[in-house]
Amino acid sequence: MASFQRNLFQGLLAGSAALLLAACSDSGDSSSVETPAKASPEKTAEPPTVTVYSARAEHLIQPIFDRYTEETGVKIRYITDSAGALIQRLKAEGSNTPADLLLTVDAGNLWQAEQEGLFQPVESDTLEANIPDHLQSANNEWFGLSVRARTIVYSTDRVDPEELSTYEALADDQWNDRLCLRTSKKVYNQSLVATMISTLGEEKTEEIVSGWVDNLATAPHSNDTSAMEAVLAGQCDVTIVNTYYFGRMQKENPEIKLAPFWPNQDDRGVHINVSGAGLTEYAKQPEAAIALLEWLSGPEAQHEFAEANQEYPANSNVEPSEFVAAWGDFKADSVNVESAGRLQGDAIRLMDRAGYR
């Protein structure tokens, strides 16, 4: 009897299990259908951060970099220092450098960085279209972004502009004890003399520089502003400065008794130089850095970049600011600014021989 009851119970249990399985099967085989997971929103890639080593002052570059970030979302981290210090830093850091771009003043500094192997070539139709050949590296390793003219500035009280003509003429006797110059230790005058060597030859250039030294009314000044202040004080009548230094003084005093004169208009033209930038050899964000460089060469950025420091756009399709344009048009020297670096050593030795300190 116990055996019969046990068998009956086992049979009922088996039948119940069969009915349960059938019920599950009739429900659409829910045991084999997975509930789909909620789709997670796609993650948008974070815009890259471009790191720039800049020898240009923070107040000149930050507004432009901020504007680029607003337009593109790309963040720009920048470190400012002198050109020499940044070049040495890049050399010391080697492949560990965080820098994607080096931005600095004067073609001599850009050329030096190129010779140190700190840049890599950039192939860009945009940059080639925007930046003239004589304002960039022959190897496409750096590109000018703004232009400054190093020209003659004279006292409007004591000098008739008809007396002025060329850089060379400042070595003539009529300017004896009337000339002030910035020190030869600064790259700007080294670049001027280097481009003169390129055009006139070393012997003729040394003769001119020696004449400048003979005509000095004061010892060479530490900077362009000091040289112009000496002209205003009557210590001398003429000097040679970068146009943006004159622009700064004129901004502060629109009635200033100084004016620029564009020399050599009947031959090679006014000496010009650039601030510019190149893609570093070990850039971590090369594509983003090139995109920034291209944007800086475009019309909108060119106008703002040049206007911030009273310079001229490197892009010849962009007009200078009204303030700068008021100084008048001039013919610029078309010698490749690379010569400012290539002949820099020759220029330094020549100035030393001429007694230009």
Image (spheres, grey):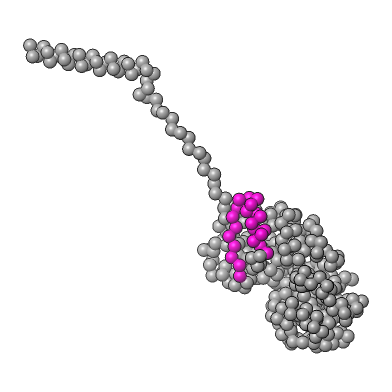
Quarter-wise, where is residue 8 in the image? Answer: top left
For residue 206: magenta?
no
Quarter-wise, where is residue 107 in the image? Answer: bottom right
Instruction: Locate the C terminus and report the quarter of the image it occupies.
Output: bottom right
- Residue 121 visible somewhere in the drawing: no
Q: Where is residue 221 in the image (x, y as percent from the top left)?
A: 73, 82
Taking depth in this image into account, of 160 and 196 the one nearest to the observer is 160
Instruction: Locate the N terminus and report the quarter of the image it occupies.
Output: top left
Residue depicted at 17% across the width and 16% down the height? 10
Side (left or right) of 343 relative to 280: right
- Residue 89 visible somewhere in the drawing: yes
Residue depicted at 74% across the width and 77% down the height? 225
Taking depth in this image into account, of 203 and 20 the one nearest to the observer is 20
Side (left or right) of 231 relative to 308: right
| Above or below 122: residue 89 | below
Side (left or right) of 247 relative to 69: right
For residue 77: magenta?
yes
Residue depicted at 64% across the width and 58% down the height? 65
| Above or below 8: residue 208 | below
Span of residues in magenta: 60-81
Q: Where is residue 279 in the image (x, y as percent from the top left)?
A: 63, 60
Q: Position of residue 209 (x, y in %)?
A: 79, 82
Quarter-wise, where is residue 32 in the image? Answer: top left
Taking depth in this image into account, of 279 and 259 the one nearest to the observer is 259
| Above or below 122: residue 225 | below
| Above or below 86: residue 322 | above
